[in-house]
Image (tube, rainbow, N blue to C red):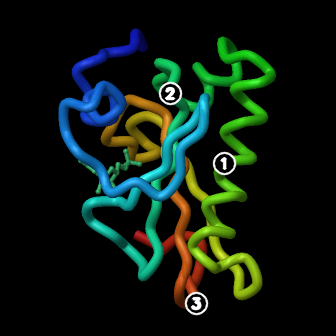
Amino acid sequence: MAYDDSNVFARILRGEIPCNKVYEDEHSLAFHDINPQAPIHILVIPKGQYVSIVDFTAKATEIEIAALFRAVTKVAEIAGVTDEGWRLLANIGINGGQEVPHLHIHVFGGRKLGPMLTRS
Ligand code: AMP
């Protein structure tokens, strides 16, 4: 899938719409999810234009890839969930339930998160 730069996270990166920022570095940005599914629900995104983790691992530099995963860990530290435990998740494509076509890692925490998936 080609990257569509009209997606909401591209607009956040361009400063066209606001976000509730948690962390930023040269390669990554993290902000609170607008519709949180847990007491802590933060999204971590690369600043580069990547649709998904598949696109990212195929095209991003080693520095960008390392930076994103370091940013995820940093965000968990900032959110104060490192000791009690937390979860990261990335939805990919239609079956994965991905709504925004710019790679994002969800960071969840702040309560026991239960089973990984519900049966349906
Ligand atoms: P996904 O289903 O994995 O694509 O997740 C997209 C996430 O983006 C959802 O959890 C939304 O609540 C979140 N989201 C959508 N628009 C915004 C926004 N403007 N600021 C923060 N989070 C957003």
The residue that mark 1 highlights is 71
Q: Examine the rendered structure and indicate whether residue 81 appears above or below residue 96.
A: below
Q: Residue at x 25, y 35 (%)?
A: 8
Marker disc for residue 1: none
Query: How far apart, in angstroms, are the residues tagged by discs 1 and 3?
Result: 23 Å
Q: Examine the rendered structure and indicate whether residue 95 appears above or below residue 75.
A: above
Q: State the image coordinates of residue 71 (x, y, percent, origin top left).
A: 66, 48
Q: State the image coordinates of residue 82 (x, y, percent, origin top left).
A: 73, 76
Q: Nearer the viewer, mark 1 or mark 3?
A: 1
Q: Is residue 53 left or right of residue 39?
A: right
Query: How far apart, in angstroms, are the residues tagged by discs 2 and 3?
Result: 31 Å
- Asked which quadrant contains residue 81, the reply is bottom right
Q: Amino acid at mark 2?
A: Lys
Q: Residue at x 60, y 38 (%)?
A: 25
Q: Nearer the viewer, residue 115 or 30?
A: 30
Reading the chain from its start, which is encountered first: label 1 or label 3? 1
Reading the chain from its start, which is encountered first: label 2 or label 1? 2
Counting other residues with Cα less than 10 Å from the Cα at mark 1, is it few (<14), some (14-19), or many (20 or more)? many
Q: Nearer the viewer, mark 2 or mark 3?
A: 2
Q: Amino acid at mark 1?
A: Ala
> In terms of secondary structure, where does tag 1 sit?
helix
Counting other residues with Cα less than 10 Å from the Cα at mark 3, is it few (<14), some (14-19), or many (20 or more)? few
- Asked which quadrant contains residue 17, the reply is top left
Q: State the image coordinates of residue 11 (x, y, percent, origin top left).
A: 26, 29
The residue that mark 2 highlights is 47
The residue that mark 3 highlights is 112
Q: Is the residue under label 3 in contact with that under label 2 (CB below 8 Å)?
A: no
Q: Is residue 115 left or right of residue 66?
A: left
> In terms of secondary structure, where does tag 3 sit?
loop
> In terms of secondary structure, where does tag 2 sit?
loop
Q: Examine the rendered structure and indicate whether residue 65 appears above or below residue 84.
A: above
